[in-house]
Image (tube, rainbow, N blue to C red):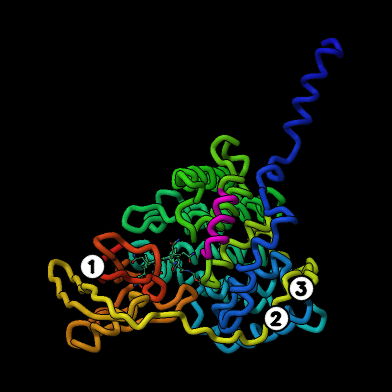
Amino acid sequence: MRQSHQLPLVGLLLFSLIPRQQCEICKVSKENKTALKPLVHTMISSNYTKGIQAAKVLLSLRLGGFLNQNQDQHLIEQFILTVRSTEPSLTSGQLALAILALGACKGPDGISINYSELVKKLGNKYKAEIKNMEDHDGNPLTNYYQLSLDVLALCLFSGNYSVPKVAEIFKPGNKNYYFHKQFSVDTGATAVLALTCVKRSITSGQNKTDTKDLDNIDNHIKLLIRKILSQKTENGLLGNRESTGEAMQALFVSSNYYNRNQWVCQKTRNRVLKEISQGAFRMPTAAAQILPALMGKTYLDVNKDFSCVYGSDIFHISTQEPISVTPAVSASQIKVNYSVVINNAKDRIVVSVANGSVFLNVMEQAQKENAALFSFTAEETSWGPYITTVRGIKANTTDRTYWELLSNGEPLSKGAGSYVVHAGDDLEVRWSTY
Ligand code: CBY
């Protein structure tokens, strides 16, 4: 072949060698960083920097380099104590997130963390998840979102897990990716991050396995990415507002699995920035889930041997207790309908609550008026209260049962503590399977 003919070929070859991944990360520019201030403020000044719920917030702040060294040291020291005292009762995913947060980067000297002990405990919790699946028709103790976090943390921190088992259970057709036949973008996205870590550990030679497993894992990633992209909305979000951040992370690390025209990252990013400017992501966990992607980071950037980047306190936000502001609930009362639905039986009540009340307030009022029919219990989670029992009937992951929240027949995309009710709403808690 003549040299002049070879040139285009060489060019093509060079072009194909440019890592595409870089092009797909559309992080917020330096000039636009102030747009992120409300998120950082929500996270730092909240009580969510305390307790195990702080894990995701800490992980996010550390990945984004939003803390100064003093803040980091203080929060990490506090968090180590929390993890130590609560570890036996933590779910697998909570412990996985705690490990990711502690090992997000190498913190100040003098803080020593026994990763191998924590990772071993995570390995045991993960095993218990698998055992539950084997004994109970493929249902884990928690859910696939948490199993994905488990595999991700075990993979990043050299824990014990079986690659063939991962390849087997994370098949995209598995029911655990779906709630009521609806694909859970949050779950699919964390699974992509976990599978990508496992794939990288195989290709780098750290993990020896059959090539069949590698092919399967590769195929799972491809199909999960396709499913995530199928949940892209007109306005650019992936799934809903809350799932978009982790879905962006999944797409960042798998740009070889889709074409440029299938996802315009800038459109998603701009939509998210618009939502922030309109006051979205007020919940610390929601803020924590969106922030890394906006900084061009993913959970795969977690590296306990890499020194943390300490911002020069860019937003001047302190970890001091925030001055508590009581929400401006106007004194006027509104009437809403509330029902408890179990199979075909519906018990209904009309209750009066203060304007600006949330779903939980309605449940409390109904319980006050008729405890026999409307008693309930809730558990605090990083997303606010989760309704565990109504009239003594308990939600159970092993049977895939839960209390579904609906308004005017539509399932809510917010929890009981954050959905603000409107006059005349037809609110419902329904005994459901997912
Ligand atoms: N986190 C978890 O283990 C939760 C994983 C998650 C996929 C999660 C969404 C996503 C996330 N990023 O954390 C999830 N929900 C799950 C797995 C579940 C199931 C929980 C039981 C189990 N298998 O572990 C279940 C039962 C299907 C479920 N979620 C129910 C509900 C409803 C809660 C009602 C109640 N009883 O209180 C509700 C309100 C839906 C409804 N209409 O009934 C619901 N979830 C919602 C809205 C949400 C979103 C919360 C958004 C918000 N603004 O508050 C969610 C972010 C989340 C939390 N669920 Co679920 C999904 C979304 O909208 N993108 C790991 C741990 C370590 O933190």
Residue at x-position 26% and y-position 79%: 390
Observer-nearest of 346 and 80: 346
Q: Earlier in the sequence, mark 2 or mark 1?
A: 2
Q: Earlier in the sequence, mark 1 or mark 3?
A: 3
Q: Magenta stretch: give its range.
A: 268-280
Give the Cα distance between marks 2 and 1: 42 Å
Side of 149 relative to 207 (left or right): left
| Residue 396 x, y percent position in the rendering | 32, 73
Q: State the residue position of label 1.
A: 426
Q: Earlier in the sequence, mark 2 or mark 3?
A: 3
Query: Type of residue at label 2?
Result: Ser
Give the Cα distance between marks 2 and 3: 9 Å
| Residue 46 x, y percent position in the rendering | 58, 80
**25, above or below 424, in the image:** above
Tell me if I can see residue 164 in this picture.
no
Q: State the residue position of label 2.
A: 318
**401, above or below 293, in the image:** below
Residue at x-position 72% and y-position 32%: 16
Residue 274 on the magenta segment: yes
Label 1 CA crowd tier, 10 Å (few <14, some 14–19, many 20+): some
Question: In the picture, residue 409 is in which quadrant?
Answer: bottom left
Tell me if I can see residue 52 in this picture.
yes
Where is ligand 1, by quadrant?
bottom left
Observer-nearest of 43 and 31: 31
Observer-nearest of 172 and 101: 101
Q: Which mark is residue 302?
A: none
Q: State the residue position of label 3.
A: 313
| Residue 277 x, y percent position in the rendering | 57, 60
Residue 349 on the magenta segment: no
